[in-house]
Amino acid sequence: MKTFRYFLLPIIATVCIAGCKTGPKISSETAADIAAITDSAAFISPVYAKGFTVNYLEDGIRLVDIKDPQADKEDIMPVGYSFALVPKGLSSDICSKLIPEGYLKVEVPVEKTIAMTLLQLSNFAALDALDKLSAITSTKNLFNKEILARVEDGTLQKIGHEGNFDQELIMAANPDIIFISPFKKGGYDAIKETGITLVPHLGYKELVPLGQAEWIKFTAMFIGKEKAANQTFAQIEKNYLDMKALAENTQTRPTVFSGEMHSGNWYAVGGMNHLAQIFRDAGADYLIKDNNTGGVNIEFEKVYSTCAKADYWRILNSFSGDFSYDALKKSEPRNALFNAFKNKKVIYCNMKQTPYYELAPVHPDLLLKDFIAIFHPELIEENYQATFYKLLK
């Protein structure tokens, strides 16, 4: 399979445009799409994200391969997905000659999509592409005024929750593709029967914060927002790396743990999770050091033996009303035994009051700054207004 390197892309664009003007198989509209795809500023090449790769062929065709970023784990996605993104109007003769066997053809840019998660939704918001959405699953913990207005006026449909999708509403939304999360609750077998192309979005499984954020480039390829994605991500990357460098030479590294008790178990992010990496980049040591990449269920006794003396305790939940130390103690009396509780060092974010999943997946730079402001306040400007996390009062 012949691929083209980044420095050849402007040449490809010139050749395509010249050929399209005189050749009988490519219209002027398709030629314009090819030129946009092969513009060097629109070139997509993931650096941090490990869940997708992109190979450029002739005539603006891109081969996109999706695999589980956590491929060394037992719960990996059982199969990979391969798509050939083809400029609209490109002849079937050209496609059949260039596209290898096993790739599902998708004409781009698509006009209508469905986002199944807030993480996916965050990509569309960051790319100013909400007009590309025809449906979402829910408005729970959703703050974006434009999305809420679109739901209110019927422009944007709600199709139900994962595992209980309304197939009729999905069909009425008439999407070209549906972005899915194969590891979530499910219900995708019913959607498959619609014949709509399902595209896995695995940003939430990336192991590093910038890897998760870089999935805006993946989304952008399907909706024609490549330039915007590259520009947006470049700024996020710069902000993140600048913040990380600021915290690298700190003299002290406080300790932190995460999670709380639910139904008899303590659910905490694993030691290889992207959030654990943000803690480390913010100049702190995360105490759950196992190799689990997602979340781990731990008995209280084990959490306490590991984290009783930790300096900080991070909690993210959806609490009705104002969360407090009294509420934390009431939910589990033993919570008061932790030093972080006694010393009032609980780091807290309430998803009912903060657009966490609308912003955090594409803005790890803002998350990082929040944590640095808490762990090392001397490094951040005075009167800093946190975006997500603050010390619980």
Image (cartoon, rainbow, N blue to C red):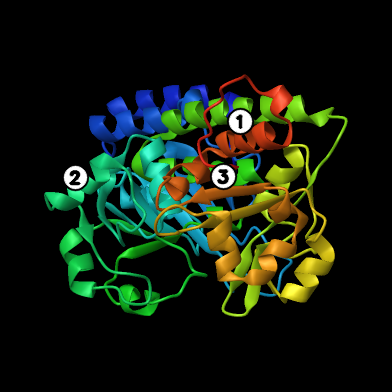
Q: Earlier in the sequence, mark 2 or mark 3?
A: 2
Badge 1 amino acid = Glu
Furthest residue toward top = 381
- Say which residue label 3 marks: 393
Q: Is residue 308 left or right of residue 324?
A: right
Badge nearest the viewer, 1 or 3: 3
In the image, residue 271 above or below residue 364: below
Q: Earlier in the sequence, mark 1 or mark 2?
A: 2
Kindly tell me whether residue 89 is visible in this rendering. no
State the CA–CA distance, disc 1 to disc 3.
32 Å
Badge nearest the viewer, 2 or 3: 3
**Spot occupied by residue 123 in the image (x, y as percentages of width and height):** 42, 43
Q: Secondary structure at mark 1?
A: helix
Q: Secondary structure at mark 2?
A: helix
Badge 2 amino acid = Ala
State the CA–CA distance, disc 1 to disc 2.
31 Å
The C terminus appears in which quarter of the rendering? top right
Residue 278 position by quadrant: top right
State the CA–CA distance, disc 2 to disc 3.
34 Å
In the image, residue 190 above or below residue 116: below
- Say which residue label 2 marks: 149
In the image, residue 251 above or below residue 180: above
Q: Residue at x 74, y 64 (%)?
A: 337
- Say which residue label 1 marks: 237
**Spot occupied by residue 325 in the image (x, y as percentages of width and height):** 58, 55
Q: Is residue 179 left or right of residue 160?
A: right
